[in-house]
Image: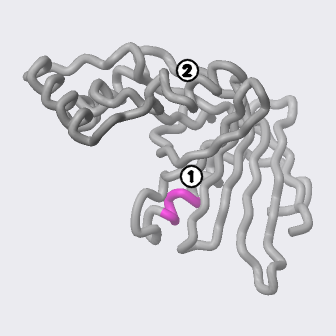
Amino acid sequence: MELEAIIDPIPLFKKWLSEAEKTEPRDPNAMQLATVAKNGMPSVRTVLLKDIINGNFVFYTNYESRKSNEILDTSKGAICFYWKSLNRQVRLVGSIKKVSDEISDNYYKSRSRGSRIGAWSSKQSRELDSRNTLMEEVKAFEAKYPNDIPRPNFWGGFALTPIEFEFWEDGDFRLHNRFILKPTEKKNQWTAKRYYP
């Protein structure tokens, strides 16, 4: 990558992800998602990238969870992929919004029966008195939905629209390769500049 090169970061990201899929022992699509509350307090957790749609990074969750509440309050977030097997990292910052019901429905239908029941059973981010209580919820929803399991209206996807990318690659003596990309006025064109490590 040359200094101030004009590129589309999505093909580069997909190339790095494809390489990670060959070397990472588990979940190469795992990403750390950082959100911020209205009071300015940040929080971070690991979620799974499930799709890239029109340059937007899509993940799924319970819409009543802490992360969802913070996203709905601020519409801002950051995600970071770290592939230890390759000594590479990609960081993105951007705005986040819900995906369409159609997109959420299509993904939900692709999930295993157990995962679909789990979406109904877990009151994510709320206190749980015991594991037994959760498993009783699972049994109740298994009985309620012996066949088709509809998507709960409190569960679905979000998409992060990047306004900044950073590609980072490990270098000897901590002299890493680091490029930050910001969008130009032209669609799918980003300016890449090299930064000190």
Q: Quadrant of residue 95?
A: top right
Residue topped by disc 2 = 98
SS for tag 2?
Answer: strand
Work out whether residue 61 can be spotted: no
Amino acid type for the residue under numbered disc 2: Lys
Camera-side residue: 30 or 154?
154
Range of residues picked out in magenta: 16-20
Other-residue count near label 1 (Cα within 10 Å), few / some / many at <14 / 14–19 / ≥20? few
Residue at left offset 40%, top offset 69%:
25
Amino acid type for the residue under numbered disc 1: Lys
Q: Residue furthest bottom?
A: 173
Q: Is the stretch drawn in magenta largely helix, strand or loop? A: helix
Q: Position of residue 45 (x, y in %)?
A: 56, 46
Residue at left offset 54%, top offset 32%:
53
Residue topped by disc 1 = 14
Q: CA distance from mark 2 to mark 1?
A: 22 Å
